[in-house]
């Protein structure tokens, strides 16, 4: 007899939606069929959707430290509360420092595993951050990949950007060793003069952050990165794509058959740059993120990209900033404002409500871009699809629930949400990780397929 049956729900996979029961034993999906019979326990899912839990491949969780011992746990609990059952997180570039002050990717991985052991409510993995601060990041990549971290992020902008020569070596080494680079594409040659001009004119309020990071800066860097990957014949994953001109660059690469993948984020799908016109700095700093929010035409273009397959994944880009401890008010000059916003708990709600309930993408496509594709692209073959043999990481979803997203009702460790006041349709009712209530997440050593 199975341990648990989810009875009578609509089972959603990328291939279609069917009315069925899901039988779960030992944390795995044992059967999906019309009437699987008795089980030790049952959850009635009639009138509900049953979805694979979301896999959020883009988060920046804070490692537990003396000042904030519980934020890693709280944010992984928040993920589960919102319907996310696996999280991949970037580590802080400041970790992995040896006694002599040298930074190392492998030391960063060891430190990450030590500090997060037993702390996660959901299964989780690491995406390392490569910066110019590590002594020999390229030499370390084969060991990192072999140790279960086959994806890693680098930046084309900021003072920790990688020079082109290093970026090329990272791409080549990744391609030769079964890894994939996740790249932040913005062109500093466009952004930095704009920032300098704003500051010289005394325009240093938070709203000028967006004006200095135009779509051209993102599109130019995206094209340059795609060109580099084509020359090297390396796969490339573009993180947090926000605007139509960058989307076009990806569409062209895909049309040429290149292994270029792209991710967007819920905030680019639900919010616009109109928010930067708010005269209240306290509101504007909640949306100081990079790339910044774009126009409603960009929002519609991104939904189009999700429909037609140019965009592969939606990740939250969760940055657990708080206004009181990380962003600060009164706001400092905009280049000094911590860059990011929380979103780990609201991913499925925003995508379901703005996407599926508003008819912009199908339910099946939603489960592809928040679960199946992240599993396929990031080396998580036991997750991402409701299928016999895979982990029973799933969400019973009430498609008819209506609520308003409010900070006071969220569980994350931030003190704000950029989605404050957004009315959403749909809500998670039950969330299971490996067939049980969330709470005992394991570190996953990943291999790309
Ligand atoms: N890039 C991210 O991925 N997150 C926050 C800010 C940034 O530049
Ligand atoms: Zn980034
Ligand atoms: Zn990010």
Image (tube, rainbow, N blue to C red):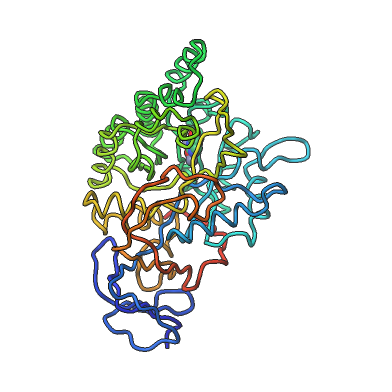
Query: At 57% from the left edge and 32% from the top edge, which residue is drawn?
Result: 329
Horizontal side of 98 relative to 171 (left or right) equals: right
Q: Is residue 421 above or below residue 396?
A: above
- The number of numbered discs placed on residues in the rendered structure image is 0
Residue 349: in sight, yes or no?
A: yes
Residue closest to the far right: 99
- Between residues 208 and 292, which one lies in front from this camera angle? 208
Q: Position of residue 13 (x, y in %)?
A: 29, 64
Is the residue 239 above or below the residue 372 in the image? Answer: above
Q: Nearer the viewer, residue 392 or 292?
A: 292
Say above or below: 78 vs 333. Answer: below
**Residue most toward the front?**
279
Residue 108's x, y, as percent? 64, 45
Whole-percent x, y for residue 214 in the image: 37, 24
- In the rendered image, the quadrant that contains the C terminus is bottom left
- Occupied quadrant, residue 384: bottom left
The residue shown at (26%, 59%) is 364
Residue 427: image location, x then y, percent? 37, 61
Compared across the picture, whether 68 is left or right of 11 comes to: right
The image quadrant where one finds the N terminus is: bottom left
Residue 173 visible at all: no
312 vs 50, nearest the viewer: 50
């Amino acid at each position: 007899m199975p341990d648990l049956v989810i009875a009578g729900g609509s089972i959603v996979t990328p291939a279609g939606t069917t009315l069925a029961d899901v039988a779960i034993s030992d944390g795995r999906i044992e059967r999906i069929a019309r009437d699987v019979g008795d089980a030790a326990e049952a959850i009635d899912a009639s009138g509900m959707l049953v979805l694979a839990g979301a896999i959020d491949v883009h988060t920046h969780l804070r490692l537990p430290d003396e000042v904030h011992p519980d934020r890693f746990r709280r944010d992984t609990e928040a993920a589960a509360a919102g319907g996310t059952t696996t999280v991949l997180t970037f580590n802080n570039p400041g970790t992995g420092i040896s006694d002599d002050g040298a930074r190392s990717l492998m030391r960063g991985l060891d430190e990450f595993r030590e500090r997060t052991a037993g702390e996660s409510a959901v299964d989780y993995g690491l995406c390392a951050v490569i910066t110019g601060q590590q002594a020999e990041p390229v030499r370390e990549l084969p060991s990192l990949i072999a140790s279960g971290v086959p994806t890693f992020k680098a930046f084309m902008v900021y003072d920790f950007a990688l020079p082109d020569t290093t970026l090329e070596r990272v791409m080549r080494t990744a391609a030769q060793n079964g890894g994939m680079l996740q790249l932040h594409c913005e062109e500093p040659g466009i952004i930095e003069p704009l920032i300098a001009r704003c500051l010289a004119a005394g325009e240093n309020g938070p709203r000028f952050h967006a004006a200095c990071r135009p779509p051209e800066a993102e599109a130019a860097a995206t094209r340059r990165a795609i060109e580099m990957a084509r020359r090297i014949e390396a796969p490339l994953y573009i993180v947090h794509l926000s605007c139509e001109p960058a989307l076009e660059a990806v569409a062209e690469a895909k049309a040429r058959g290149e292994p270029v993948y792209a991710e967007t984020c819920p905030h680019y799908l639900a919010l616009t740059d109109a928010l930067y016109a708010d005269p209240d700095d306290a509101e504007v700093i909640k949306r100081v993120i990079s790339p910044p929010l774009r126009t409603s035409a960009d929002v519609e273009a991104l939904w189009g990209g999700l429909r037609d397959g140019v965009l592969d994944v939606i990740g939250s880009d969760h940055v657990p900033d708080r206004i009181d401890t990380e962003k600060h008010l009164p706001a400092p000059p905009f280049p000094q404002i911590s860059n990011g916003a929380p979103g780990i708990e609201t991913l499925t709600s925003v995508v379901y409500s703005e996407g599926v309930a508003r008819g912009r993408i199908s339910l099946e496509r939603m489960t592809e871009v928040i679960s199946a594709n992240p599993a396929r692209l990031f080396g998580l073959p036991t997750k991402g699809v409701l299928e016999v043999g895979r982990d029973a990481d799933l969400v019973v979803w009430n498609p008819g629930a209506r609520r308003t997203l409010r900070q006071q009702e969220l569980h994350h460790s931030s003190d704000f949400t950029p989605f404050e006041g957004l009315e959403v349709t749909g809500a998670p009712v039950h969330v299971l990780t490996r067939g049980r209530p969330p709470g005992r997440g394991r570190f996953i050593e990943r291999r790309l397929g």
